[in-house]
Amino acid sequence: MTDTPTGPDTGAIFYHGTRSDLKAGDLLVAGWTGNYRSEPLSWIYFSATLDAAIWGCELARGEGRERIYIVAPTGDWFDDPNLTDKKFPGNPTRSYRSRAPLRIVGEVASWEPHAPEVLQAMKENLARLKAEGAPIID
């Protein structure tokens, strides 16, 4: 038996996009409201692709600066079924979730945002799904 957390993409660099102002060593934990719904989430979400983290911070609610943190899972993690089962079979976005905290180990200083029209189209699509009652995140 090992105490080392495991999951898909073990050994990859993982990212979490948000508007929260945090520092290295802080923990991101489940139990907060997410980017796509107002109820607390029982999972913490992250990705092994920078693009998925960019979406995370661009779609994050709040007024803070968009940030992308480099994170390390402190417990086992799994494919994010919101994407892998519903939108992108095979998980090309390399999106994951865990019930264990993520430790912030750094911050990505520079990244390219999505074009304004692409971001607006995504926000409109999410609003449409919400209006239709679609379960966006479980």
Image (spheres, rainbow, N blue to C red):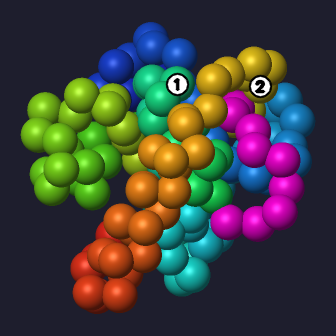
Which marked residue is nearer to the observer: mark 2 or mark 1? 1
For the point 54% across and 82% down, which residue is it? Answer: 39
Is residue 44 visible from the viewing direction of this image?
A: no
Residue occupied by mark 2: 107
Task: Decide whether residue 64 is among the magenta residues.
Answer: yes
Is 31 positioned to the left or the right of 109 in the image?
A: left
Mark 1, Cα crowd under 10 Å, few <14 / some 14-19 / many 20+, is many
Residue 54: name its quadrant. top right
Dot 2: element: strand
- Nearest to the observer: residue 88 or residue 75: 88
Residue type indicated by callout 2 = Glu
Instruction: Specify the label residue 31 is tagged with.
Output: none
First in sequence, mark 2 or 1: give its number: 1
- Nearest to the observer: residue 90 or residue 117: 117
Residue occupied by mark 1: 50
For the point 49% across and 69% down, which residue is it? Answer: 36
Residue 30: name its quadrant. bottom right
- State the image coordinates of residue 2 (x, y, percent, origin top left): 41, 23
Q: Quadrant of the C terminus?
A: bottom left
Residue type indicated by callout 1 = Leu
Asked if residue 82 is positioned above or below residue 69 in the image, the reply reads: below
For the point 11% across and 40% down, which residue is it? Answer: 89
Residue 131: name its quadrant. bottom left
What residue range appears in magenta?
61-74
Is 109 positioned to the left or the right of 74 in the image?
A: right
Asked if residue 132 is positioned above or below residue 65 in the image, the reply reads: below
Is residue 12 visible from the viewing direction of this image?
A: yes
- State the image coordinates of residue 75 (x, y, percent, origin top left): 49, 39
